[in-house]
Image (cartoon, rainbow, N blue to C red):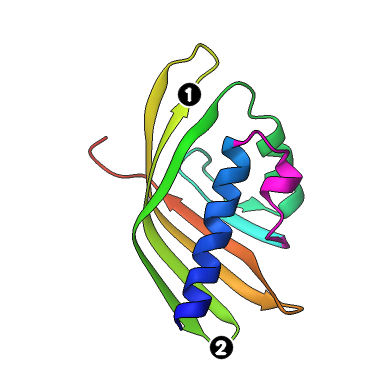
Amino acid sequence: NAQVAAGVMALARAQWAAEIAGKSGAEQNASVADDYTEFNPDYPTRLEGKAMSTAMTDASGGDKAVFSDMQNAKVQVYGDTAILTYNFVGIRRDAAGKTSPNTAKSTRVYVKMGGEWKLVHANFAPVSGR
């Protein structure tokens, strides 16, 4: 479904745009479900809940995304569930102004709740050889 695919990709891009613009964690996580879960390479366990994700976003300090994009995006739709997979490419800037690449193999799972697509789970895997 091209319309659903465009919509869920737009939600991910809106989240990145909010981060780049310096918006609050709440604004960045506007499309995240309350019971959101996440795996990422920075933490050894599953992260639980929108509240935790928002608090971690707000505590991130001087490190900030300055560019974010998805390559090779694919959306698979199964009724009220959409799975977005892509290769993430980005650039981060630390508090000292130094930039570094930011890459991941990414999966985001969205569920239609109350007529809106909400991010319920994400897995951001490291790119090997970095």
Secondary structure beneath disc 2? loop
Secondary structure beneath disc 1? strand
Question: Picture coordinates of residue 39 (x, y %)?
Answer: 52, 52
Q: Which region of the structure is painted magenta?
A: 21-34
Q: Where residue 93 is drawn, which disc sits there?
A: 1
Q: Is residue 65 visible?
A: yes
Q: Is residue 52 visible?
A: no
Q: Where residue 66 is drawn, which disc sits there?
A: none
Residue at 72%, 62% (x, y): give it.
35
**Residue 108 covered by magenta stretch:** no
Q: Is residue 18 left or right of residue 65?
A: right
Q: What type is the residue that disc 1 sits on?
A: Arg
Q: Is residue 103 above or below residue 9?
A: above
Residue 99 lies in what quarter of the image? top left
- Mark 1–mark 2 Cα distance, whole angstroms, equals 39 Å
Q: What type is the residue that disc 2 sits on?
A: Gly
Q: How many C-alpha atoms fall within 10 Å of the one at disc 2: few (<14), some, or many (≥20)? A: few
Residue that numbered label 2 is attached to:
79
Question: Picture coordinates of residue 128 (x, y %)?
Answer: 27, 43
Residue at 40%, 64% (x, y): give it.
85
Question: Picture coordinates of residue 68 (x, y %)?
Answer: 45, 43
Q: Is residue 103 left or right of residue 20?
A: left
Q: Is residue 51 left or right of residue 101?
A: right
Residue 75 lies in what quarter of the image? bottom left
